[in-house]
Amino acid sequence: MDEKWQRPRGTQDILPADAARVERLRRLVSSVAALYGYGAIETPVFEQTAVFVDGVGDGTDIVQHERYSFVDSGGVALTLRPEGTAAVARAYVEHGLSAWPKPVRLYYWAPMFRRERPQKGRYRQHQQYGFELYGSPEPSADAEVLLVARRLLERVGLTPQVLVNSIGCDVCRPGYRAALVSYFQERWADLCEDCRRRATENPLRVLDCKQDRDVARGAPDIADFWCAACRAHQDAVMALVADQGLAVVREPSLVRGLDYYYRTVFEVHDPSLGAQSTVLGGGRYDGLTARVGGAPVPAVGFAGGVERLLMAAGSAVAEDPVPRAYVAQVGPGRAAWRVGEMLRDAGIPTEVDLMARSLKAQMKEAGRRAVVVVLAGGQEWEAGRVGLKRLTDGREAEAPLVDLTETVRAWLDEHER
Ligand SMILES: [Zn+2]
Ligand SMILES: [Zn+2]
């Protein structure tokens, strides 16, 4: 096929069977959101570029290398949303949600755009779900979002492995940063090219580098630098989730790739996914609203990729075929056409022939698509009756048209059991 007519590299078309799985996952996410009182929020697919450059931070990969930015015909610099948290923070500030009763719980499900190197389960346009809890500085807020993440993954059939760390605060992080810089200076020769730059600009991010795992392993541990408040916060989060039977492991090299995090950061892994095992990630981001034009508000949340979760999810999101009816036209006329809409009026998924097929061909088609066939037309139709056949067990009957919807529904229900 001419490349010109192929979808852009790193994007995907989602065909009906997969779309049905996506839809089931989406319902599952909303049901968990409802359980904990998170309300849906939708923001535009694009924002003014500053929301992401200032909000996410221009030292991050998603802003520096991966963003889809353009200037519209009015001269406005816009960027396709690469992640949800900064956009939600912008909306939170713009609509004055800090005046709402605290805490404010929000969730989203939305397409994101990043010009990444395409790989398994990672797309340049992909969907993410995310949960954001605004207004509480308490460790119980961090713990709640961890419990939301656990429940979500359990419903999808995963046994998540949770890694947690604290990257400290403005009081204690500078000391850690300085210790890291001097450690990386000693190991300069071992660092990859990107990390030599990061080592002075944003040394925490070196801990995140896939190529420099060995260097990261020997680095100073931030736990030795936590101030008393950060240590107490981290201990309290760990205790609260342990109280609910959620086992979490502290991972000293866990820092996350984004600049807005503060104290708690976490990742949830599913070991069955192999090398790309991260299912979702999140943390606390108390300073973010101040980066997008508001006052600082404490906040914590997480986000994950829908595609990755679908890969990990088993039968919990398997396609559930809907039992349908098929109305075959017997002889000339429009009986099937009328009965089709009549069954749909009663909420029964129904197909009728649109291909001018013979009755025999219609029956064959029904075998592929339906559980119950209604035969409409001919002399029976004149007498106000239709024929019925259940394809799964061969049961046949004739019914007065007035009883049809009830009979079809009963036959479909019996099939489901
Ligand atoms: Zn601190
Ligand atoms: Zn590196």
Image (spheres, rainbow, N blue to C red):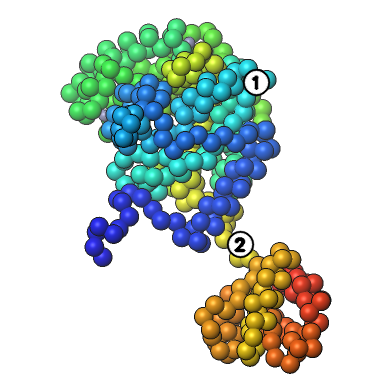
Point out which mark residue 11 bears: none
Of circles 1 and 2, which is in front?
A: 1
Nearer to me, 21 or 184 = 21
Furthest-bottom residue in this view: 379
Res. 320 visible in picture: yes
Question: Is the CB–ligand 2 distance for label 2 below 8 Å?
Answer: no
Q: How many marks can you see?
A: 2
Circle 1: residue type: Trp
Locate residue 195: give its quadrant. Answer: top left
Residue at 41% across, 25% down: 51
Q: Residue at x 66, y 74 (%)?
A: 340
Sequence-wise, the earlier of marks 1 and 2 is: 1
User: What residue did someone put label 1 on?
Assistant: 100
Estimate the spatial distance between the alpha carbons at disc 1 and disc 2, rounded to whole Å. Answer: 40 Å
Q: Tell me: 248 left or right of 396.
A: left
View quadrant of ligand 2:
top left
Question: Label 2, on which residue?
Answer: 320
Helix, strand or loop at label 2? It is loop
Q: Is residue 280 visible?
A: no
Find residue 44 and report its horizontal and vertical position in percent: 47, 35
Which type of secondary structure does the marked residue at label 1 adopt?
Answer: loop
Q: Residue furthest left?
A: 189
Near-viewer residue (148 or 222): 148
Q: Position of residue 224 (x, y in %)?
A: 43, 13
Would you identify the image quadrant in which residue 235 lies?
Answer: top right
Residue drawn at 69 percent across, 37 percent down: 35
* Left or right: 154 in relation to 52: right
